[in-house]
Amino acid sequence: MSNLKIYNTLARDKQAFVPMEAGKVRMYVCGMTIYDYCHIGHARMMMAFDVIYRWLQTSGYDVTYVRNITDIDDKIIKRAVENGESISSLTGRFTQYMDEDTGALGILPPTHVPRATEYVPQMLALIETLEARGLAYQGEDGDVNYAVRGFPGYGKLSGKSVDDLRAGERVDVNTGKRDPLDFVLWKSSKESEPEEVKWASKWGRGRPGWHIECSAMSCALLGELFDIHGGGADLQFPHHENEIAQSEGAFGHTMVNYWVHNGHVRVDNEKMSKSLGNFFIIRDVLKKYDAEVLRFFILRGHYRSPLNYSDAHLDDARGALTRLYTALDGVAGDGQALDWSEAHAVRYAAAMDDDFNTPVAVAALFDLVTEINKSKSPALARQLKALAGVIGLLERTPQQFRQAAVGEGDFDKAVDDAVIASHIEARSAAKKARDFASSDRIRAELLAAGIILEDKPDGTTNWRRA
């Protein structure tokens, strides 16, 4: 197979990836709560695990990939009531919009996309198991809660201790809990809630809590123990911590071997979120930028690192992607197998095996562009196309990209003056730092886009289009 290493949040270290079953991988990722349009933060999460999914398959693994849909939740109920529509109508509509967005971005469909409402019987069975083990109890208010202090390993994923959590807790107004740290497994129905969200149970009519949904769905589709569990960094606590407590508390053994979390998208150094109002809807961004430009922008950052969003960064991504496509001009389409022994492919694979390091993999693509510009080799150009295709890039012809991302005008002018200026500034900084490799790389990238630099004796740099 491969020499893949994955950063395991639970171990806080990169670890060699060893699947439970040779040649097969089982992966679960927490998906969307469906009541609104997906934003760039959601795109970043789905893109991170799309790349992981693609690389695992490229590495020869048979991957069962599950990404769930939460279609029952307080926010969903509130929005449906406000709209005067059924919950199934609301979630069905926004699921369709999500599928349209992910399709545009080239995000592959997972093997399974379970909806929480389809797995309520499995959730109830899991809660009954927890109750039998002394880890679940019904409070005076009718809710069924998880007894956190009954699970000795609580906090091992997030690094939080129960005592620290107690020391920092607020006064809990929910008198139905024995301990303020306990969390809800089953919510007792309220008269005001739609009948659509009321299921029968031994504890009375109600609906599942959020955390129990993923424990039940992952177990049903992947088993009590599986290889990889992923999601956004914000889910590490309490959601994933609570999943561990539920699943390991019920089954008495490890739930997941590798926990993987992607970093946040940031705007002006603040996390992008609906609560802050600084979020950007995917389909709004795609009105201004080609979907592959957005995909490339996301892939230029390592999945675990914060990703700073701005139009300037998307403009820069468009210029850089243009340089990749320029190297394919005049080259016939596919028809050449990817040569993994070729030097750039070796570096590319090593980067992807190093915790899916797409920035280094993309750098190998640009180095290959430099070689193509020197040699004018059609074989290397086809190698570039094949390598980029592994992570869902360069899958169109340059002409198709020109029409979609740049317009009918001069292809090379996609690299606008602001982008050129930013690259010249970066090159100047690299030269001052004596980082001549980066300086040469930037010059080569600009040359690939038809931009010729002329260094002056006074230290300034002029440029012109070839």
Image (cartoon, helix red, strand yellow):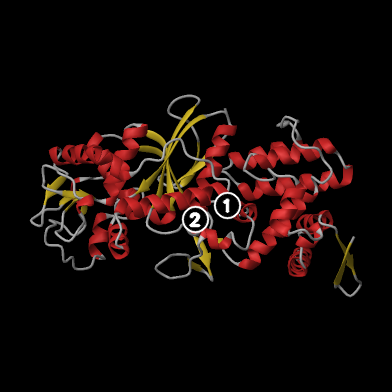
Within 10 angstroms of label 2, few (less than 14), some, or many (20 or more) residues? many
- Residue 147 visible, this angle: no
- Residue 406 is situated, as x and y percent measured from the top left of the image, at 73, 59
Residue sticking out furthest to the left: 140
The local secondary structure at tag 2 comes to loop
Image quadrant of residue 180?
Answer: bottom left
Q: In whole angstroms, how far apart are the C-alphas of marks 1 and 2?
A: 9 Å
> Which kind of residue does numbered mark 1 sit on?
His
For the residue carrying disc 1, how many other residues have a C-alpha within 10 Å: few (<14), some (14-19), or many (20+)?
A: some
Q: Residue at x 18, y 40 (%)?
A: 130
Q: What residue do we see at 44% from left, 65% from top?
A: 273
**Disc 1 and disc 2 in contact, CB within 8 angstroms:** yes
Which residue reaches farthest right?
A: 457
Quadrant position of the C terminus in the picture: bottom right
The quadrant of the image that shows the N terminus is top right
The residue at the point 39 percent across, 68 percent down is 275
- Residue type at tag 2: Gly
Q: Which mark is residue 263?
A: 2
Mark 1 sits on what residue?
302
Viewer-proximal residue, 283 or 271?
Answer: 283
Q: In the figure, residue 391 lies in which quadrant?
A: top right
Q: Position of residue 436 (x, y in %)?
A: 79, 58
Q: Residue at x 19, y 49 (%)?
A: 198
